[in-house]
Amino acid sequence: MMAWTITGMLVLFIVVNWADKTVFGIAAQPLKEELGLTSAQVGFIGSAFFFLFSITGLTVGFIGNRVRTKWVLFTLAALWSLTMVPVLVSASFATLLISRIGFGAAEGPSGALANAAAFEWFPKEKRSFPSAWLSSGASIAKIAIAPLLALIVAVWGWRASFVVLALAGVAWALAWALIGRQGPFAAPLGRRSAPVAVQRVPFRRIALSRTFLGCVVGTFTMYGLVSVILTWLPSYFEVGLGIDRLQAGVMFGLPSISGMTAMLAVSWFTDRRVAAGSSARVQRGLVPAVALLVGGLLLALLPYLASPVLAIIAVVVGYGIGAAALPLANAAVSQICPPAQQAGTLGVFLALQSASGLFAPALTGWLVDVAATPGAGFALAFQVFGLAVVVGGIATALLVDPERDAQRILG
């Protein structure tokens, strides 16, 4: 029971975090109009979120090997709220840029540490499903919270949405301080661990393994698409397909519905198969590879779809299928590293994965600015990132085999 209570709190952690990230996409057009920004500038701010994201993901992830994840997560949630303040005090391109960079720095380690905290409560063969719930926190934010944020932006303006999210971050941090605790599968920390033999291996053995590299390539391509959806989807619906602004904000959650459904269903099934003795090579290597291939191909078709309805279906279904690969990759990486190095390994993995966000939103903004129409620019951007996801699927299929690499690394 406590395992799922902690997991539930961590899902809420991800929901608040992704609501903070989602608000920029919802407020992009109002901000663009009020501050006189170009699409390229909006895309640059979207990419700026990732300037320090990977660096803090790397450094704080290793801190998580030495410090209780409870207090690291508490600190990160508090910092999210603080990053909202500059924009509320003085709205400009500069303050918006600084705010998003600061938020990205505080958010960088969040996914890795949330997964590490959850994995303290589950054995290795049962980690895809809780990881899928954590990944679904992003979907829950876009399904349940994004429409509320769109309504707040439409009625009270974008500043009100920033205030609401800052208060939500503080509320979660206070609740976590009371509820959070260490799980039975956590490695001992500090001086109490001295009498216990804690396994550690040179990190390069993990990072240079085929499974780690395959998971990085596969999820790097998918996360580029995630960052584009996060920054540009409401704008695509509004200026690319001609949908009303409030309706576009409400529709922001559609890809997340398909993504959450796919992640939970596929992860639940693959965990059951692994626990029953099925090969992790198949369940955590080939299954995510197929998801990336199918999802990427659907998105690559977007420029050839004349109907807005078909375009929406391609984005919603393609994104959803591809997203199923993300929690499976987290579980595969956790399978090849010792528990004492789990937080740091996941920190490095998710930092490398999310590095695609450094350029993907900015590239999309540039393509929209230079295209004949915004709709054509968005369609081309989705095609480019869809084809990249296909490449990621091929790499995943060729490289990922957690059982093989766990044997080589852990002995």
Image (tube, grey):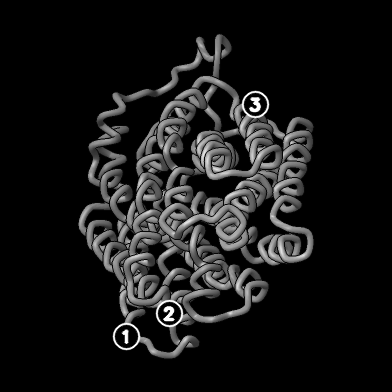
- Going by the picture, which residue comes out furthest to the bottom? 307
**Which mark's residue is nearer the viewer, 3 or 2?**
2
Mark pair 3, 1: CA separation: 50 Å
Q: Residue at x 31, y 75 (%)?
A: 300
On screen, residue 70 above or below 311: above
User: How crowded is the residue under tag 1: few (<14 C-alpha within 10 Å), some, or many (20+)?
Assistant: few
**What residue is disc 2 on?**
314
- Amino acid type indicated by mark 1: Tyr
- Amino acid type indicated by mark 2: Ala
On screen, residue 264 above or below 54: below
- Amino acid type indicated by mark 3: Trp
On screen, residue 162 above or below 203: below
Question: Along the horizontal axis of the image, is 326 left or right of 36?
Answer: left
Residue 29 image offset from top left, x and y in percent: 57, 63
User: How crowded is the residue under tag 3: few (<14 C-alpha within 10 Å), some, or many (20+)?
Assistant: some
Res 62 → quadrant: top left
Question: Along the horizontal axis of the image, is 378 left or right of 264?
Answer: left
**Which mark's residue is nearer the viewer, 1 or 2?**
1
